[in-house]
Image (cartoon, rainbow, N blue to C red):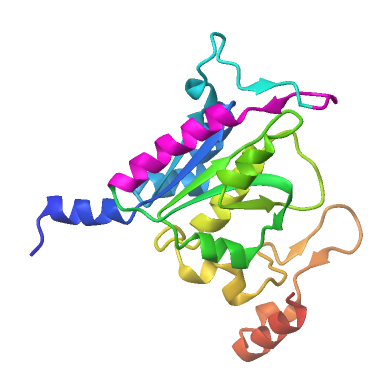
Amino acid sequence: MKSRKAASTHRASRMKSFHVITIFPELVEGYASVALLGRAAAKKLLKVEAVDLRAFSRERHKKVDDAPFGGGPGMVMQIAPIYRAVQFLKSKAKNRGSKVRTILFSTRGNVFDQKTARRLAKYDRLIFIAGRYEGVDERVAEHIADEEISLGDFVLAGGELPALTVIEAVARHIPGVLGRAESLEEKKGSYPVYTRPSIFQPTKGKGWKVPEVLQSGDHAKISAWRKKKGR
């Protein structure tokens, strides 16, 4: 029989780590501490760490941005503090023999989807670079990040929300994070769902009813209905 210490060590070795390099750690820490991610962290299935980029700045006022070469509006995030942050995180991972992937969020990146979530779930550690201002020095994409990811054809103020979105999507593929494996939507398909009451009466007139087939108890008919309505 394995000792408690051995079992604990084995479990810890399987814990996945997500590191978000950001100038607003509180944005990441708040979301990651509750609900799905918070419960998974409490079970030691994963760890979400907000890494303060300013801690890797060597400038007096912890500055991490500067004016763009060639002129133009806004400020650009500097490569130096990002490089130091990523190297620091990789050195921690290297000591444990972890499989690591570094991701930069960019409107020019490949659009994130379930296939990408499943692929990223195979890594032990994921490092996310959350940009701000007018963008990130292009050398980060060229020499530091392993890939660029976009959530779609729109622009956000920073990469923190995309990072949390990817983390949650990836976390769902970690064994034990979901209460039941069948909760994964790509396994059962996305179809309309209902719960009690069977008739909801918001105002006078005709109530809003649950489809009768779902209350029939006929599993074959229910399965066929869900297949037809799914997408």
Rendered location of residue 42, percent (x, y): 37, 44
Residue 27: quadrant of the picture: top right
Rendered location of residue 207, percent (x, y): 84, 63
Residue 63: quadrant of the picture: top right
Which residue is located at x 71 percent, y 67 percent?
Answer: 198
Rendered location of residue 123, percent (x, y): 44, 58
Which residue is located at x 69 percent, y 62 percent?
Answer: 197
Asked whether residue 50 appears in the rendered view, the answer is: no
Asked whether residue 161 appears in the rendered view, the answer is: yes
Q: Nearer the viewer, residue 192 or 168?
A: 168
Q: Nearer the viewer, residue 72 or 108?
A: 72
Image: 104 above or below 25? below
Which residue is located at x 68 percent, y 71 percent?
Answer: 190
Which residue is located at x 28 percent, y 45 percent?
Answer: 95
User: In the image as oriented, which residue stretches furthest toward the top?
Assistant: 60
| Placement of the C terminus among the 4 image quadrants | bottom right
Q: Nearer the viewer, residue 159 or 96?
A: 96
Q: Which residues are magenta?
A: 70-95
- Residue 194 covered by magenta stretch: no
